[in-house]
Image (cartoon, rainbow, N blue to C red):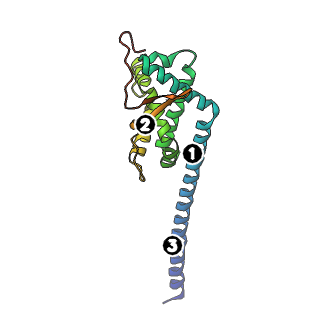
């Protein structure tokens, strides 16, 4: 064999090895960057949901749910003095749902920490969201909030260590821990008038 042929063969082999190594290195780098992006998204979700104002907004939603449960009037969630807090809870969980669904936030990590909370907020606001959908004539309204609540329910129901049916849990009143509502119970329905 001629030296030039040997050099050409060795060059092709070395070039192939470098190309394959580069491919695997870039793939690993992409996966690392994606994971870092998901972690950053998760940290941002934690910051949002752990802010004091968001905690207060959720307390408002939970307290309103007790009132809705007893009176059956979904308009309770639209009162001028609380509408902003309710809208913030819905919007934040809707955005979180979209980010989890699009894999910008790690699904398992988010649901481990906030899945049951997302479900509780969804259950408290479900009838309100349904009424809003009807009023707007726009069924996709708060789709990702609903999706996230359902994901939270499924995550805990089929949890790898021990399953929990979140419908078997109770919601405690934020201002009176002696008051509680089982998620198995259904709110009273208002007898007359429009649902909104």
Report crowding for label 3: few under 14, some 14 to 19, many 20 or more residues within 10 A (C-alpha): few
Distance from the alpha carbon under mark 2 to that under mark 1: 26 Å
Residue shown at 54%/61% (left/top)? 28
Quadrant of the drawing holding the C terminus: top left
Whether 94 is drawn above or below 81: the answer is below
> Where in the figure is residue 30, as x and y percent of width and height?
55, 57
* Residue tagged 1: 42
Report crowding for label 1: few under 14, some 14 to 19, many 20 or more residues within 10 A (C-alpha): many
Q: In the rendered structure, find residue 169 and report the number of the disc placed on it.
A: 2
Residue shown at 53%/15% (left/top)? 79
Q: What element carries label 3?
A: helix
Q: Which of marks 2 and 1 is in front?
A: 2
Q: Nearer the viewer, mark 3 or mark 2?
A: 2
> Where in the figure is residue 13, as x and y percent of width and height?
51, 77
Q: Is residue 184 left or right of residue 42?
A: left
> Where in the figure is residue 193, as x and y percent of width and height?
38, 9
Whether 173 is drawn above or below 190: the answer is below
* Residue tagged 3: 16
Report crowding for label 2: few under 14, some 14 to 19, many 20 or more residues within 10 A (C-alpha): some
Q: Is residue 150 left or right of residue 37?
A: left
């Amino acid at each position: 064999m001629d030296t030039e042929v040997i050099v050409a063969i060795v060059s092709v082999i070395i070039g192939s090895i470098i190309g394959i190594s580069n491919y695997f290195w870039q793939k690993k780098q992409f996966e690392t960057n994606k994971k870092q992006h998901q972690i950053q998204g998760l940290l941002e979700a934690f910051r949002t949901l752990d802010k004091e104002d968001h905690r207060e907004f959720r307390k408002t939603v939970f307290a309103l749910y007790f009132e809705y449960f007893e009176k059956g009037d979904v308009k309770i969630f639209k009162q001028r003095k609380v509408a902003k807090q309710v809208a913030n809870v819905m919007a934040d969980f809707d955005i979180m749902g979209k980010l989890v669904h699009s894999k910008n936030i790690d699904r398992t990590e988010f649901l481990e920490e906030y899945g049951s909370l997302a479900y509780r907020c969804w259950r408290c606001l479900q009838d309100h969201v349904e009424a809003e959908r009807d009023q707007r004539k726009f069924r996709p309204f708060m789709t990702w909030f609903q999706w996230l609540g359902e994901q939270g329910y499924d995550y805990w129901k089929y949890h790898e260590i021990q399953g929990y049916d979140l419908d078997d849990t109770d919601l405690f009143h934020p201002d009176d821990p002696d008051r509680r509502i089982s998620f198995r119970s259904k709110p009273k329905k208002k007898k007359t008038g429009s649902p909104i």
